[in-house]
Image (tube, helix red, strand yellow):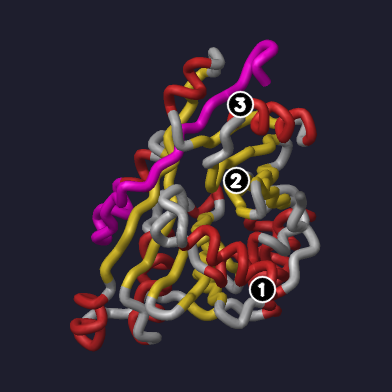
Amino acid sequence: MDFRSARASDIDWLFGVLAQSRSAPEGMLRSYLWELLRFEFTDIYYHTRKGEVDSVFCSFWFREDRIFEEWICDHGDYLGLLSQLLALRGGTKHIRIGSEAVGASLGWELSDIAYEMKLDLRAMRASASATKRAPVVDYDDCFRDATIDLLSEEWWTQEQARSFVDVGSLNQSGISKVLVSQGQPVAFCHASRDGEAAWISALYVSNKARGKGYGRETLLGMEHTLAADRIRHVYLGVDASSSPAIQLYESLGFQFTSFKKYQFTPGGESA
């Protein structure tokens, strides 16, 4: 079953399923799901058995690479279900699942590990008045075209970047920041808020502006805004192969949670 045309009630229901599953990320937020379900390059599938949901999967594109990710899987015939969904979604390049043993048993090559990191903002809130704010401004529609160009440099196609920017701006719980240099945004950050938590779904610095500390400044600007909004904890995802990103997040106080996914590159008949 596909969630592409999900209603608000469907999102509430899916969020309830994720919240009750030990397989769901600690920082999974309803606001983040709201956005995810509306991206034009994202599909969410679920499987029911005996009237209860036992599996939820997400499939999305980064340019030409499709990533297929397991969120919940208590399905008895897990491998059969996985094979059906992979056959349905052709062009899959990477698969993220919670079990390293399953991928190894299929002969897939382990290509990366996706981690979740968490930051406690309460200390920042207490010292915010004594901390110099980063030179970052709120996203505005006047930055739309330049932001789409920025995000499509490496991550997405123009259509995907446009979908991300437009959907994010429609989310009342979402917030976007840009760092502007010479009148143009050179760094972008987006977060989804839900209660006292927030999930950072994008942090990107233009290729020509890297190595200048813009990523740090942009993330700090977002953290200050979230702290002022009484957010207690911030979550984000990072790949083990992204050493510079991990070093940046750790330097800002982020710590790894217990949640992680193993990323495989399928090959041969197993895919």
Name the residue carrying label 3.
Answer: 79
Q: Disc 1 designates what residue?
A: 143
Q: Earlier in the sequence, mark 3 or mark 1?
A: 3
The answer to whether residue 222 of the structure is visible from this angle is yes
Residue 1 in percent (x, y) is at: 76, 49
Q: Nearer the viewer, residue 59 or 150?
A: 59
Residue kind at label 1, given as amino acid type: Phe
Q: Residue furthest front?
A: 50
In the picture, measured across the screen, residue 93 lies left or right of residue 216, that is right
The answer to whether residue 231 is above or below residue 179 is: below
Q: Which contiguous range is marked in magenta?
A: 247-271
Q: CA distance from mark 2 to mark 1?
A: 39 Å
Up the image or down, 102 lies above or below 34; here it is above
Q: Position of residue 270 (x, y in %)?
A: 65, 16
Q: Which residue is mark 2?
A: 55
Q: Could you tell which of marks 2 and 1 lies nearer the N-terminus?
A: 2
Q: Which mark is residue 179?
A: none
